[in-house]
């Protein structure tokens, strides 16, 4: 089981492309690996515990990434709105100075 977990860790965590890595993790999750690993987490084999922890500690949290992405998008929209507002205020200020 240790060798199998080492293989899974190498296959999943050596991938450079984040999208493909998430895809691989998703495939293993759909196969029930996460649930199985939770059951095995209390095994007496220290080597297996290390491999299980290595896998679970390096899993991308897609929900958190999506939430961060939505937060970033909202923040960028607010920045654009504030920059636009600042441009209008600055233009109005410049016109006021010219007429004085």
Image (cartoon, helix red, strand yellow):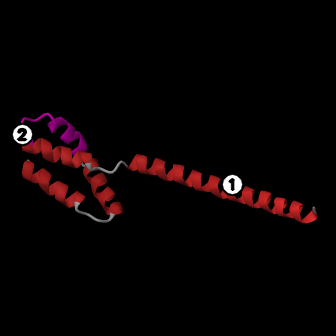
Rendering coords of residue 66 (x, y %): 45, 50
Mark earlier in primary sequence (1, 2):
2
Q: Mark 1 to mark 2: distance in Å?
A: 57 Å
Is disc 1 placed on a helix, strand or loop?
A: helix
Seen as rendered, the residue at the extreme right is 99
- Which one is nearer the viewer's eye here, 81 or 19? 81
Q: Which quadrant would residue 48 be assigned to in this image?
A: top left
The secondary structure making up most of the magenta span is helix
Q: Which quadrant would residue 81 be assigned to in this image?
A: bottom right
Seen as rendered, the residue at the extreme front is 100
Q: Does residue 21 lie above or below 56 as drawn?
A: below
Rendering coords of residue 30 (x, y %): 28, 49
Q: Is residue 87 visible?
A: yes
The quadrant in which the C terminus is found is: bottom right
Q: Name the disc covering residue 45, or none.
A: 2
Position of 49 with respect to 77 (left or right) is left
- Which one is nearer the viewer's eye here, 21 or 72? 72
- Which one is nearer the viewer's eye here, 78 or 53? 78
What residue lies at 83% left-to-right and 59% top-to-bottom?
93
Look at mark 1 in the image and give the residue it sits on. Answer: 82
Mark 1 neighbour density, 10 Å: few (under 14) some (14–19) many (20 or more) = few
What residue lies at 14% left-to-right and 33% top-to-bottom?
42
- Which one is nearer the viewer's eye here, 98 or 20? 98
Magenta residues span 33-46
Position of 7 with respect to 15 (left or right) is left
- Whether the magenta-drawn stretch holds residue 36 is answered as yes
Position of 86 with respect to 92 (left or right) is left
Q: Which quadrant would residue 16 be assigned to in this image?
A: bottom left
What residue lies at 26% left-to-right and 63% top-to-bottom?
15
């Amino acid at each position: 089981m240790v060798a199998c977990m080492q293989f899974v860790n190498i296959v999943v965590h050596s991938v450079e492309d984040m999208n493909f890595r998430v895809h691989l993790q998703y495939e293993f999750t759909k196969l029930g690996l996460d649930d199985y690993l939770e059951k095995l987490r209390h095994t007496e084999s220290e080597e297996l515990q290390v491999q299980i922890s290595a896998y679970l500690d390096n899993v991308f949290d897609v929900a958190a990434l999506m939430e961060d992405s939505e937060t970033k998008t909202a923040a960028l929209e607010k920045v654009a709105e504030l920059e636009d507002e600042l441009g209008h205020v600055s233009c109005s200020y410049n016109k006021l100075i010219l007429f004085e």
